[in-house]
Image: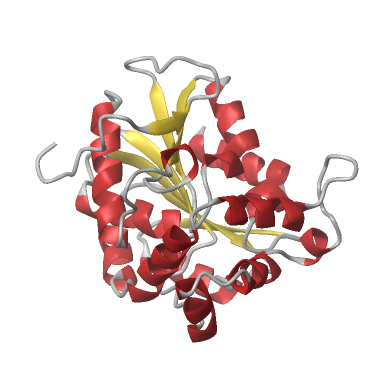
C-alpha cells in the first residue's frame, strides 16, 4: 500500500482458531495502552464464528510481539495498521479500537479512507491527555502507574470484582496484564496518547460509518468527551454502556458485543 509502513515479517495476531478467508468481511481489533489482544476475547471470538475474519492484534512491543520495537506515536500505529490490513490480504476492514487503539483507528480511517469500511471507537476522545503524575510514574517504571491505571479504568463493578467468572476480579486481571508487559512500552504508549493533538481534525475527516461507544462511568475518556467526538464525525452513532468504565469490553462484554453486532450487521 502506497505510503503505509508494512508490519514486520513476524506479526502477532489472534484469529480465534479460524483461518483468514480471502474475500470475507474482515474486522481488525486494536487494543489500548499497555494491553494486548486478549482484551477482545468475547467480541473477537463471536465475530470469528459469525462470518468475519476477526484479527485481534498485538501491537509491536505488546503481548506476543513484546520483542519488537514499540511504535512511538498514534500516526505510526495508524501506518502500521494500514500495512497489516494489506499484509493479511484484505481490501478493506472494519476497525474496532479501544482507547489508544481507537485514536490510531480513527487516524487510519482519515488517512486511508478506502481501506476502512466501518469504524468503532471504544473509550475514545478527540484529546486523551495523560495526567503528569502518571506520565512521570510510568517513565520511571514505577508499579504505582499500573495501580493508578487500573483504578481509573474501571467503574464500580470492576472495583467490586465484576467478572462473569465465579471468583474472578477484573481489576486484578488487568493489573497482571499490565505488569507482565514491558514497562518502557507502557510509558511510550501513554506519551503517544498525551502528545496526540490531531483528534479534532482527524475526526472531521472520517467518512466511513462510525460508532462511538462510551462507558457511563469512564474517567479516562469521560462521556461528555465521547459524545463530543461523535459530534465531530459525520453521521456517527453514539451509545453509552451503563455500569461500565473505560474497560467496557471486559466490564460489560455482552452489552459491548450487542452494540457492535447491531452496528456491524
Residue 207: tell me if it is visible: no
How many discs appear? Answer: 0
Report the residue at 59% width, 50% height from top: 180
Report the residue at 36% width, 45% height from top: 60
Q: Work out which quarter of the rendered image holds the N terminus and state it.
A: top left
Image coordinates for residue 8, horizontal then vertical, percent: 26, 36
Vertical side of 152 occupied by 215: above or below: above
Rendered image coloring scheme: secondary structure
Residue 167: tell me if it is visible: yes
Report the residue at 62% width, 69% height from top: 143
Residue sticking out furthest to the left: 2
Image coordinates for residue 221, horizontal then vertical, percent: 55, 70
Vertical side of 13 occupied by 194: above or below: below
Res 159 quadrant in image = bottom right
Residue sticking out furthest to the bottom: 132
148 or 77: which is nearer to us? 148
Vertical side of 252 occupied by 85: above or below: above
Image coordinates for residue 149, horizontal then vertical, percent: 62, 68
Image coordinates for residue 58, horizontal then vertical, percent: 44, 41
Answer with left or right where residue 38 lies relative to residue 83: right
Answer with left or right where residue 20 lies relative to residue 225: left
183 or 241: which is nearer to us? 183
229 or 5: which is nearer to us? 5
Residue sticking out furthest to the right: 166
Amino acid at each position: 500500500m502506497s505510503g503505509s509502513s508494512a508490519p514486520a515479517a513476524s506479526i502477532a495476531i489472534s484469529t480465534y482458531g479460524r483461518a483468514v478467508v480471502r474475500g470475507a468481511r474482515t474486522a481488525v481489533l486494536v487494543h489500548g495502552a499497555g494491553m494486548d489482544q486478549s482484551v477482545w476475547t468475547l467480541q473477537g471470538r463471536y465475530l470469528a464464528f459469525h462470518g468475519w475474519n476477526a484479527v485481534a492484534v498485538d501491537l509491536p512491543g505488546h503481548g506476543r510481539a513484546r520483542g519488537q520495537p514499540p511504535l512511538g506515536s498514534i500516526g505510526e500505529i495508524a501506518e502500521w495498521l494500514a500495512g497489516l490490513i494489506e499484509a493479511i490480504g484484505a481490501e478493506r476492514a472494519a476497525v474496532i479500537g479501544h482507547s489508544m487503539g481507537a485514536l490510531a483507528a480513527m487516524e487510519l480511517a482519515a488517512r486511508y479512507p478506502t481501506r476502512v469500511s466501518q469504524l468503532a471507537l471504544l473509550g475514545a476522545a478527540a484529546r486523551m491527555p495523560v495526567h503528569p503524575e502518571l506520565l512521570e510514574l510510568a517513565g520511571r517504571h514505577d508499579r504505582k502507574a499500573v495501580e493508578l491505571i487500573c483504578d481509573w479504568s474501571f467503574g464500580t463493578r470492576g472495583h467490586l470484582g465484576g467478572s462473569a467468572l465465579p471468583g474472578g476480579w477484573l481489576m486484578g486481571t488487568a493489573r497482571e496484564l499490565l505488569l507482565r508487559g514491558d514497562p518502557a512500552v507502557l510509558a511510550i504508549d501513554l506519551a503517544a496518547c498525551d502528545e496526540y493533538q490531531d483528534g479534532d481534525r482527524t475526526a472531521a475527516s472520517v467518512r466511513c460509518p462510525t460508532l462511538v461507544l462510551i462507558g457511563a462511568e469512564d474517567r479516562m475518556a469521560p462521556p461528555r468527551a465521547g459524545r463530543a467526538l461523535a459530534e465531530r464525525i459525520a453521521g456517527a452513532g453514539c451509545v453509552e454502556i451503563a455500569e461500565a468504565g473505560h474497560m467496557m469490553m471486559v466490564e460489560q462484554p455482552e452489552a459491548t458485543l450487542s452494540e457492535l453486532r447491531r452496528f456491524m450487521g
